[in-house]
Image: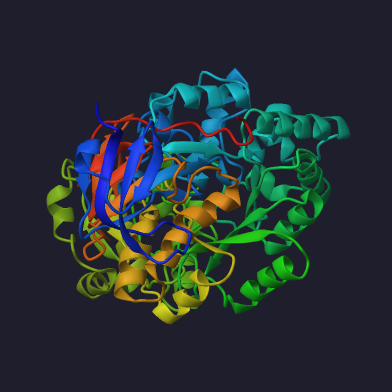
Amino acid sequence: MSKYDLVIKGGTIIDGLRTPRFRGDIGIAGGKIVEISSNIPPEDGAEVIDAKGKVVAPGVVDLHTHYDSQLFWDPWCTMSGWHGVTSVVIGNCGFGFAPCKPEDRERAMLSLTRNEAVPLATMKAGMPFEWETFKEYLDSVEKAPKGVNVMSFVPLGPLYGYVIGLDEAKKRPATDEEMQTMCDLLVEGMEAGGCGFSLQVLGQEMNVQLDYDGTPMVTDLISDRDLKAFSKAMGSTRRGTAQITGNLDFAETIARESGRPVIFNAIGAEGALNQHGRLRNPIKETIERIDRLNQDDGLRIYAQASSVRFGSQFTFEDYNLMDTLPFWKEALAGSDVKVKIEKFKDPVLREGMRKLHEDRGGLFGAGYTMDDIVVAWVPVDHPNYEQLKEYEGYTMGELKLRLNKHPVDVMLDIALMGDLLVGFETKQIETPPENMALVINSAMALPGISDGGAHTKFVTTARFSTELLGHWARDCGIISLEDAHWRLSAYPAQAAGLKGRGYLAEGMAADIIVYDPEIVDSLPRERLNDYPGNEWRLVQKAIGYSQIIVNGEVTFRDGECTQATPGKLLRHGVA
């Protein structure tokens, strides 16, 4: 009988603690690392991985995902699972599905259709929705097969929905009694295993993450009283971390009132785009302020860094990343495609779009011009396919000359010809390496904001780990692999209070990646028709990962899923 379930031999070990790399072997049994040494005999392993010439490193901890529903039909939480991620944190931005009364389930799902662009038909078909309380939700996650480990924040949005009602809570303040009930539910959720609370506070103006009806999300309207009350409730447990998408002032308030760490979203390199295609402002002042809060004020505030070069594909059937702009927001609001089609024909809206286009110097989104946008694909089964096919592969700049039309009219006319099913693609925005180096090497930066499970028809930012290892570390040389793996694994695990994972040491959980540092990379974008409800998604798979190991079992081998589901629900603070 073999001593170990798995032995990894001869790899270059980067342990995730910034320790200098070294050659060695790892022996694994019972889902844990039992031995790290220089010469474990091959016969000691029931299975042996030859890692010569490969890097052996801790699995990636993906702090910012929206796999709250997807994990039920996709146990490996792809895209993250393809890119070396072995643990994900869900319940971000205040969005989620628990607690939820049975009669409010569809409303809860609708709230995720616009702000995170998860198809309603997919959620209905793929999510069991058999729970009411947050504990019952975690119980459901625990019994579901999982190819990654899962930990969850207690999102604040569902608390408002459960106690007051999402729509009612946007109209009036919570009463003192309602506020106390929500705080009690937060503590109850943390006692069940939630790792803290999350929320989005983007306000009413310039908000790109809106509810299904175009109104702000309920936590966008949170009062100072409510924010402090939730913070103190979390602080009363003496554990947990908060996650906030919004202004750094709010992050500071939470940290002061709770005495607990806060993960602030987000910082990004000057000239880069975030996951919503918006330009970041100069960031040096923000980094300096975060450093002062940590070093001088004794507040623990981490900053998630948008570290992926940004480009997107989209159709106007359900595009939501223009919600900060007038006319576009009005035209794209709602879920009824027939209504959108009529809005796109509206001459008043079109004139507003054209003028806006000129006023913004030809920009369509935040950092790309409309002239560069390409007709990426056309629906093959559409009656107008042959005519639409003539435009495929051409830019709006080329077509405006060919058709003698304003580029706004070119894009909308082509979209209408295909009943909003035509796919468009933006040019990838290349971030200067020196700008990205300032951000990802700053003291409190956690590279990522994968948004895995969200915006599934538009962006592929869940490739962030591969991009850090391949593009930024290898190709650009702006970060060492030792530092990269610390920021991908041990540091985010510390930030979220994820214990026993994030680095390689005897006694730690065997969440490990084995990869070729010379070739690790993301593959081209592709569309997969693998979502429940007959929906498709945009993905990028990876190359270079020989093995991805979760709790001692190989889940992916050379990019192919083994179908193993060794993942666990990680209940924060619960033995």
Q: In this rendered view, identify the residue nearer to me: 253 or 60.
A: 60
Horizontally, is 362 left or right of 394 in the view? Answer: right
Q: Residue at x 41, y 28 (%)?
A: 72
Q: How is the image coloured?
A: rainbow
Picture coordinates of residue 179 (x, y %)?
81, 35
User: Is residue 565 depicted above or below 268 in this figure?
Assistant: above
Q: In this rendered view, identify the residue nearer to me: 395 or 512.
A: 512
Picture coordinates of residue 290 (x, y %)?
67, 68
| Image-quadrant location for residue 38 | bottom left
User: Is residue 295 depicted above or below 134 in this figure?
Assistant: below
Q: Residue at x 59, y 57 (%)?
A: 207
Picture coordinates of residue 26 (x, y %)?
32, 47
Q: Is residue 533 visible?
A: yes
Horizontally, is 361 left or right of 466 in the view? Answer: right
Q: Residue furthest right?
A: 176
Q: In this rendered view, identify the residue nearer to me: 454 or 387.
A: 454
| Image-quadrant location for residue 371 | bottom left
